């Protein structure tokens, strides 16, 4: 392909994004849509046009797992590989699928028709096993569906002609409290906020004591106020409201439901935040796996512009302009970390920044930026409407309001449950029909694993904080395998910037594999423990610091599950020594005792 | 033994050293502690080591291993050290990571042997050496911690004499060995 051809499809994209290099990730994503991958010449062309070093462009393109520099298959099939997908049999399904189509995982088929691989949790834990085909999510896989999909691919049927029911994503809302059960008109929270005035909204937010729902639990009012007070910088001086919809934590899918069915509440919340903070622009960072929601969200934004809920003089308030745009992620868990997310919004590799400065003073494009979780912004909208005292009356003292919990795993009724904070783990288990649970992984892979004796504990920042995941493991599950799955997740998702995390996560995953293969010993367990210390103390961001949590928790609470796999208590080699001489034995024709290892 | 004698004659720490798939560079670096060798021999005595030419290792306190594991003999030597040494130390890049010899890991050992002894240029009536005296090569070169348990690691290619000295004196004095930044800097 020569330059001419590339400019044919790249120029319109570049024009749409005003040749702005901070849209690089979005430009790359759209450019890829044309041919399924990014040609080397296209990278050159983009670098020239955007006036960026080529390494910046290729560096970004190679960082995200949904961007490709080599042609994948025409049908790129990714099996979601969260532990909940595994428990629903995704591995056997993938093997069957590969057998059907004569492909190997990770290698495109020779005719270029299809490529198959695993991907991290797609947020469909309540309706798995899930898979992505060319970025579109398919749920509830079964032997029958996998066989049918193989036929569709062999028949080269366009994705749009595949059975509609494969693409259905259900909300599965099981328990509604004040948020999910509320009845609001789009724009109502904004009008309420305008009536209260910016100071009034901030006062209500303080009164509500709302804390961030993304996991860290920082007080939202403090964040908003800091951004409001922080001075803007330079030419493009404006403040930003960023919605973190990069819901990558394995086992979490509450934001998916909010984005699907409560998008108006989210956009209201962002607009309220914009009003209180003095921001004129909102950005939603939507994870690549939720791309199927994009058309619906864009249509919603368009409708809101027509209704006067976005744009200039929002709701008739002279001087209050606010608009929202959506950025799509491209498959990087680390971008859920707020500074990595901002880097990605700016078109770079999603490598977390050093804090301080915090985003509230120097965030997106160096401007004061509020980054809030989807659920937090929805809650903020309800506070603008109903007041802070109403909100503070729910939940516990330090954890006010309600929390959306994504329940999956060995339960009868997986889905979304909304409870006031302070609900006991027992209560949730009871409501979702978890018969014989032996453990619950709360708040995803980097969260905490609770054993039966802890089921009386409460979900709240005072006791067990959570970003929303609630994965239940029945008595028949091997908790070692659960931890091993998570260790591979972190090794895959480490951004590679700092050594303790990049190397540490890989070493832990390798040691877990060694134990799984039956060559483990107490020594390997000790190694994992000492690696954990290094990673926790020396990693650049929370990913590396938390990467060993599931292993450490299960080691503490389910040690026999590990010991069952150990071969000896002292030490075993990590490979089969005698087997490693096989080739030499064959070539020399030797079979004497010197050609074998005795024990 | 008489209690008085035990106090009077403080037994020396026994040290064994060997080079597996290495270049003896780490041993050379060990000798770079220079005149401090005299201080060292006040505290230790050497068992099996290229320095003593003792062929097999007896019960020891410390074993120093240079080089990775590339053939069956390396495995036997390593096992002998592990069996006899209370503390086993991997010294240098090859012992820790496989190092230079491990560059052969991307090649198939069978094809290497064939090319060298059977099909290569100027080979006539070739035969792969098969004398039972010869150790067989492993299909891959491994760091030593993949074969036996290793207690300590001294990084470097080679670690400097100062690093080795610091490490050993820490160990002999009962301190957890700790190489500070200057001793871990290689550029």
Image: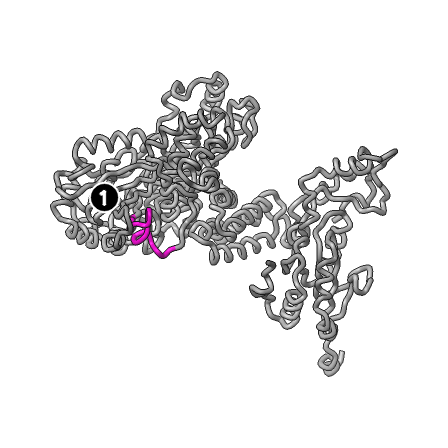
Q: Which residue is denoted by mark 1 in the rendering? A: A280
Looking at the rendered structure, the number of numbered marks drawn on it comes to 1
State the residue at coordinates (46%, 51%). A544
State the residue at coordinates (16%, 35%). A308
Is residue A250 shown to the viewer in this render? yes
Chain letter of the residue beneath label 1 in the structure image: A
- Local secondary structure at mark 1: strand
Image location of residue A420, percent across then percent down: 26, 47
From the viewer's perspective, is A313 left or right of A337? Answer: left
Looking at the image, which residue sits at the far top?
A155
Image location of residue A81, percent across then percent down: 47, 36
Q: Main secondary structure of the magenta part?
A: loop
Residue A360 inside the magenta-drawn segment: yes
Image location of residue B136, percent across then percent down: 78, 44
Is residue A450 shown to the viewer in this render? no
- Location of residue A271 with respect to A100 vertically, above or below: below
Quadrant in the picture for residue A292: top left
- Magenta-drawn segment: A355-370
* Front residue of A180 and B184: B184
Q: Residues within 10 Å of mark 1 (few under 14, many from 20)?
A: many
State the residue at coordinates (29%, 43%). A375
Image location of residue A101, percent across then percent down: 54, 22
Rendered image coloring scheme = one colour
- Location of residue A2 with respect to B12 vertically, above or below: above
């Amino acid at each position: 392909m020569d330059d001419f051809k590339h400019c044919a499809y790249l120029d319109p994209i570049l024009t749409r994004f005003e040749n702005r290099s901070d849209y690089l990730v979005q430009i790359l994503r759209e450019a890829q849509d044309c041919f399924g991958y990014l040609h080397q010449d296209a990278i050159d062309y983009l670098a020239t046009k955007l006036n960026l070093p080529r390494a910046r462009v290729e560096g970004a393109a190679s960082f995200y797992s949904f961007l490709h520099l080599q042609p994948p298959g025409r049908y790129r099939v990714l099996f979601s590989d969260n532990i909940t997908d595994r428990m629903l049999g995704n591995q056997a399904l993938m093997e069957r699928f590969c057998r059907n189509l004569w492909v190997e995982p990770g290698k495109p088929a020779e005719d270029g028709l299809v490529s198959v691989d695993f991907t991290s949790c797609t947020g469909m834990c309540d309706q798995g096993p899930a898979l992505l085909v060319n970025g579109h999510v398919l749920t509830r896989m079964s032997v029958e569906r996998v066989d049918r999909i193989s036929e569709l691919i062999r028949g080269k049927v366009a994705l749009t002609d595949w059975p509609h029911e494969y693409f259905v994503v259900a909300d599965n809302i099981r328990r509604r409290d004040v948020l999910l059960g509320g009845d609001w008109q789009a724009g109502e929270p904004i009008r309420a906020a305008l009536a209260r005035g910016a100071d009034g909204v901030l006062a209500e937010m303080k009164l509500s004591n709302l804390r961030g729902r993304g996991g860290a639990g920082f007080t939202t009012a403090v964040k908003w106020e800091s951004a409001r007070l922080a001075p803007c910088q330079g030419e493009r001086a404006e403040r930003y409201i960023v919605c973190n919809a990069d819901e990558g934590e394995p086992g979490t899918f509450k934001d998916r439901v909010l984005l699907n069915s409560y998008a108006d509440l989210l956009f209201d919340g962002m607009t309220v935040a914009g009003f209180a903070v003095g921001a004129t622009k909102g950005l939603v960072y939507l994870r690549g796996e939720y791309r199927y929601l994009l058309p619906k969200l864009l249509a919603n934004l368009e409708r809101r512009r027509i209704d006067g809920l976005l744009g200039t003089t929002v709701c008739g308030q002279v001087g209050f302009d606010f608009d929202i745009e959506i950025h799509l992620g491209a498959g990087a868990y680390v971008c859920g970390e707020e500074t990595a997310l901002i880097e990605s919004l700016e078109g770079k590799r999603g490598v977390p920044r050093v804090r301080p400065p915090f985003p509230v003073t120097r965030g997106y494009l160096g401007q004061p930026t509020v980054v809030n979780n989807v659920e937090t912004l929805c809650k903020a909208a309800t506070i603008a409407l109903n007041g802070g005292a109403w909100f503070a009356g729910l939940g516990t003292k330090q954890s006010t309001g309600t929390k959306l919990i994504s329940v999956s795993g060995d339960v009868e009724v997986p889905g979304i449950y909304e409870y006031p904070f302070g609900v006991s783990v027992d209560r949730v288990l009871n409501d979702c029909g978890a018969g014989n649970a032996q453990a619950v992984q709360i708040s995803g892979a980097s969260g905490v694993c609770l054993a039966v004796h802890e089921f009386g504990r409460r979900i709240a920042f005072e006791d067990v904080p959570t970003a929303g995941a609630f994965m239940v493991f029945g008595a028949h599950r091997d908790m070692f395998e659960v931890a091993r799955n998570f260790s591979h997740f972190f090794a895959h998702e480490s951004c590679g910037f700092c050594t303790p995390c990049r190397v540490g996560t890989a070493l832990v995953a390798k040691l877990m594999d060694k134990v799984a293969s039956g060559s483990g010993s107490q020594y390997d367990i000790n190694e994992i423990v000492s690696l954990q210390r290094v990673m926790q103390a020396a990693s650049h961001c929370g990913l590396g610091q938390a990467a060993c949590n599931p292993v450490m928790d299960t080691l503490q609470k389910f040690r026999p599950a590990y010991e069952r796999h150990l071969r000896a208590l002292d030490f075993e080699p990590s490979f089969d020594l005698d087997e490693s001489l096989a080739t030499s034995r064959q070539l020399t024709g030797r079979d004497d005792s010197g050609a074998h290892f005795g024990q | 033994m008489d209690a008085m004698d035990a106090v009077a004659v403080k037994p020396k720490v026994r040290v064994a050293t060997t080079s597996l798939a290495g270049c003896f560079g780490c041993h050379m670096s060990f000798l770079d502690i220079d005149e401090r060798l005299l201080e060292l021999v006040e505290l230790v005595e050497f068992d099996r080591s290229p320095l003593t030419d003792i062929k097999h290792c007896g019960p020891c306190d410390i074993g120093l291993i240079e080089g990775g594991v590339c053939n069956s003999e390396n495995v036997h030597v390593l096992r002998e050290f592990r069996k006899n040494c209370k503390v086993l130390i991997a010294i240098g890049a090859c012992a820790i990571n496989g190092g230079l010899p491990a560059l052969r890991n991307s090649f198939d050992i069978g094809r290497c042997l064939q090319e060298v002894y059977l099909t290569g240029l100027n080979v006539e009536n070739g035969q792969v050496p098969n004398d039972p005296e010869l150790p067989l090569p492993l299909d891959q070169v491994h760091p030593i911690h993949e074969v036996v348990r290793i207690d300590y690691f001294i990084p470097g290619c080679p670690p400097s004499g100062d690093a080795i000295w610091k490490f050993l004196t820490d160990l002999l004095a009962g301190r957890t060995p700790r190489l500070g930044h200057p001793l871990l800097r290689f550029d």
